[in-house]
Amino acid sequence: MSNTRTKLMIDLQRIEKEHYQLREGERTQDFLTLMLQFIGDPQPELRDGLIYPTLYTWIYEDNRFTETELSNLLAILTDEHHLFYHIGSEGDQSVFTRTFSVLPVALIVRLHSKKPFLDYAEFQNLKHSLLRYYKEEKDLRGYLPEGGWAHGASHGADALLELVKCPESDTAVQLEVLAAIEGMLHNGKQIFSDEDDERIASIVDTMIEEGLLPQQEIADWISGLTKCVDWQRNYVQTIARVNSKNFLRSLYFRRGQGSRGNVLAAVILAAETKLNKFATGRH
């Protein structure tokens, strides 16, 4: 295993230097199989520094894969050995396999949203997988001193952002994604400190910007985030309140000067005030 891993690192370093082009006789599939095997490597040099940039270039920039190959790759990335590898576990290295499997999923979904190639069943499986992942991921650590970025909430948000832009994502899908976001903000375990709130805000900002949901639906959902204020006061409640407050601040400033007088801006500000115990004098 160590010899295989070392050879893969050397090969990917060389491929990077040669602008991600392969030499005569080399096949993309041979490298892809190994990259999928080591996609969650605990060392960021391989996982984050070599495998993901190579996948990004080959999938998104070079269009190296056919639509059938992308569909097959998506099926692998969302299986029990990748996106759901030891799902629900916390504090171990399995998180890297899950969070670095969902990143290339986001790339494939982005391609599909621009030029659809997934059939109905494949899209439904994709949707269910991403929503399930966001609900069941319990290891929400951001940057780890040993291992680098885990960032499950952020990487999952990147994929959900691409999902809501797909032509198949109707109102029901948009609302399911909002429910998943609320679950992540009210996760009971982690106050986000590595800008996960910004990555999550990108999803709702896109819904607003592209008119993917009626503004009243979004307004009602935003107001609903404040229900945690009435929960029993403990750390679970604090997590929900602080995450929701920070998310709304990210969303408010993302919308820019031109939106601050509109209905949604007023709703965001009212919700932030309710969640902010310093503004309401509850501290």
Image (spheres, helix red, strand yellow):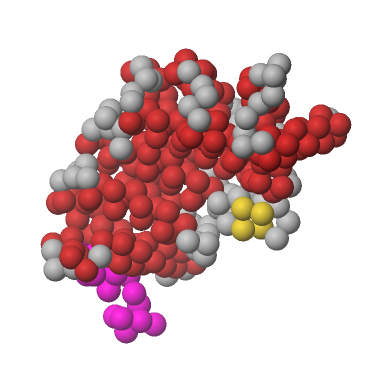
Does the rendering let one see residue 5? no
Q: Could you say which quadrant of the image residue 10 lies in?
A: top right
Q: Could you say which quadrant of the image residue 93 lies in?
A: top right
Residue 81's place in the image compared with 226, above or below, is: above
Q: Is residue 95 left or right of residue 165?
A: right
Residue 176's place in the image compared with 216, above or below, is: above
Q: Could you say which quadrant of the image residue 52 lies in?
A: top right
Query: Which is the main secondary structure of the residues drawn in magenta?
Result: helix
Residue shown at the point (62%, 30%) measured from the top left: 21
Residue 119's place in the image compared with 14, above or below, is: above
Residue span colored magenta:
266-283
| Image spot of residue 112 (x, y percent) | 37, 28
Residue shown at the point (55%, 51%) measured from the top left: 151
- Quadrant holding the N terminus: top right
Judge by depth and name the residue closer to the eye, 65 or 207.
65
Q: Is residue 200 left or right of residue 57?
A: left
Asked if residue 272 is among those painted magenta in the image, a careful observer would answer: yes
Residue 147's place in the image compared with 242, above or below, is: above
- Quadrant holding the C terminus: bottom left
Name the outermost residue toward the right: 3
Q: Is residue 198 left or right of residue 101?
A: left
Q: Is residue 159 left or right of residue 72?
A: left
Asked if residue 73 is among those painted magenta in the image, a careful observer would answer: no
Does the rendering let one see residue 117? yes
| Image spot of residue 150 (x, y percent) | 60, 50
| Image spot of residue 275 (x, y percent) | 32, 70
Residue shown at the point (51%, 18%) measured from the top left: 69
Judge by depth and name the residue closer to the eye, 73 or 235.
73
